[in-house]
Each structure stands twice: as structure tokens, then as C-alpha cells.
Amino acid sequence: QVQLVESGGGLVQAGGSLRLSCEASGRSFSTYAMGWFRQAPGKERELVAAISRGGGSAYSVEGRFTISRDNAKNTMYLQMNSLKPEDTAVYYCAAARLGMPLTLRGYDTWGQGTQVTVSS
């Protein structure tokens, strides 16, 4: 089982960009589909983007966000552009053994989260 550590969060002004990283331990990173989720205060955790094991398939709920992965580096990324105050949340990466899930239930392993705050 992999362990996941997110980084790259912080405070940014509206319209700015951030790139989040999710580094996985272990040698089996490429056998997991991966996803980014976010949770704002008082709201449910929601999917932001997902990517297949090899990176050939990707899904994002926001056209401003791009998910990618580098299996050689055991790392997944989320490039976020044109950030808005409503993007403020804790962002989590997650790993899934089966398929490329688009719901929380499909993910087996979670990171601890990284805070993204977008000021207006």
C-alpha cells in the first residue's frame, strides 16, 4: 500500500496559479489510479480530478485545473490556474486500486491534505 504526501498549497490571490504535488512512497505507484479531492469548510469532500495508472486518461471537473503524473518520480500533480476564492479548501490526493473512480468510495488511500487559500 502506498503512502501519500501532498505539498504545494498556500495563499494566492484570485487569478493566480498553484501547482500541488502528491508524492507516493513504495514501488507500486504506477498500479494505482489517482485522484485529487477538496473539502471546503462545512462542505463535503468532492472530486477535483482523476487520472489513470499510466496517465493516458484524465478527468477534471474544472477546465482551469490539469492533473498529471510522473510514474518515474512516484508523483502526481494538480496545476491550478485562474484561481477563485471559491477554490479555497483543503486539497487531498488519493489512490485507487481498481479502475479510475470518480467518487470517494473508490479510493483506498488518502494523504493528509494541503490547504489552498485564494484571497479576493
Image (cartoon, rainbow, N blue to C red):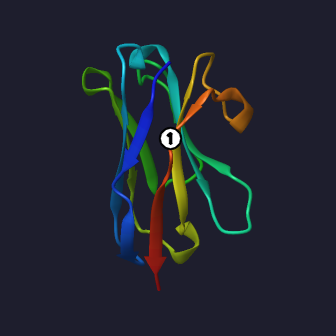
Q: Is residue 59 visible?
A: no
Q: Residue at x 70, y 37 (%)?
A: 104
In depth, the one of 41 and 30 nearer the eye is: 41
Q: Residue furthest bottom?
A: 120
Q: Give x and y (percent) for residue 10.
A: 37, 67
Q: Give x and y (percent) for residue 61.
A: 60, 49
Q: Residue at x 63, y 65 (%)?
A: 40
Q: Give x and y (percent) for residue 38.
A: 59, 54
Q: Is residue 58 visible?
A: yes
Q: Is residue 62 left or right of residue 29?
A: right
Q: Give x and y (percent) for residue 95.
A: 54, 28
Question: Residue 8: which quarter of the image?
Answer: bottom left
Total tally of numbered discs in the picture: 1
User: What's under tag 1, amino acid-wise?
Assistant: Gly
Q: Residue furthest left?
A: 72
Q: Is residue 30 left or right of residue 107?
A: left
Q: Residue at x 42, y 78 (%)?
A: 14
Q: Which residue is mark 1?
A: 111
For the residue carrying disc 1, how many other residues have a C-alpha within 10 Å: few (<14), some (14-19), or many (20+)? Answer: some
**SS at mark 1?**
loop
Q: Is residue 34 left or right of residue 104?
A: left
Q: Residue at x 44, y 35 (%)?
A: 4
